[in-house]
Amino acid sequence: MPRVKLFNEEEALGKALELFWEKGYESTSLSNLTTHLSIGKGSFYDTFGSKKQLFDNCLEAYRISSMEVVDSFLAEKQNPVEGVEYFLNKHTEFMLADTKSRGCFIANSTVELSASTQIQEFLKGHNKIMKSKLMDYLSTGSFTNDIEVLADTILNHLTGISVMSKFIKNKEVFDKSNALFMQLIK
């Protein structure tokens, strides 16, 4: 007879994402997860398979959510120069609004787990999708720089903001950096 789930799986995934985001993969134990999700080990394994599988599901859920945000930011401005500036400023605001100073879950996972071949593949795939979205968007403008290099440069800048905002909370620092960045890409 199949087991009846006594919890909402989507809600549990969200809670697990929050815990992994705060503590990182390595520092999050199975006991941390079962306590935080208010489920037993049996239910955990039946539903999520393993800590690693749950983490992978959290990464994918975060990627989907972040892609929706990127799409909405880029849709705000038809002019790619204005759009990139808007994107950088909104990303900065989002990172600085995080009172827990968690940064970006994917950027954090990159730093913590980049030695893992499986994580590297996920990260390469994520980067490829982000780069493709940016290149499509940038191709509608007239840039003097190669748009592929420009897309890589934007992603590098965004990642820097994601990491640095964990310990620098001075918006002016990021505003100046973003303004200089925009001068360089025009």
Image (cartoon, helix red, strand yellow):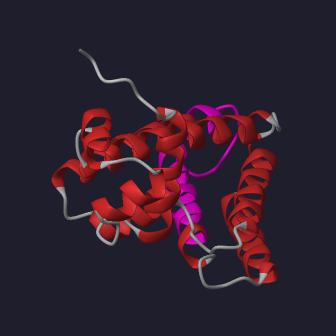
Which one is nearer the viewer's eye here, 91 or 178?
91
Q: Position of residue 42 (x, y in %)?
A: 25, 42
Which one is nearer the viewer's eye here, 3 or 123?
3
In magenta segment, residue 136 = yes
Locate residue 177: give its quadrant.
bottom right
Does residue 179 appear in the picture of this structure?
A: yes
Q: Residue at x 58, y 57 (%)?
A: 154
Residue at the far left in the pictured view: 117
Left or right of residue 118, residue 9 in this image: right
Q: Residue at x 73, y 76 (%)?
A: 174
Q: Position of residue 121 (x, y in %)?
A: 25, 45
Which one is nearer the viewer's eye here, 16 or 73?
16
- Seen in the picture, residue 52 relative to 5 is either above or below; the reply is below
Q: Main secondary structure of the magenta part?
A: helix
Q: Position of residue 164 (x, y in %)?
A: 58, 78
Q: Can you say which quadrant of the picture contains the C terminus?
A: bottom right
Write down the region rendered in magenta: 134-161
Q: Residue at x 67, y 35 (%)?
A: 71
Left or right of residue 136, residue 52 in this image: left
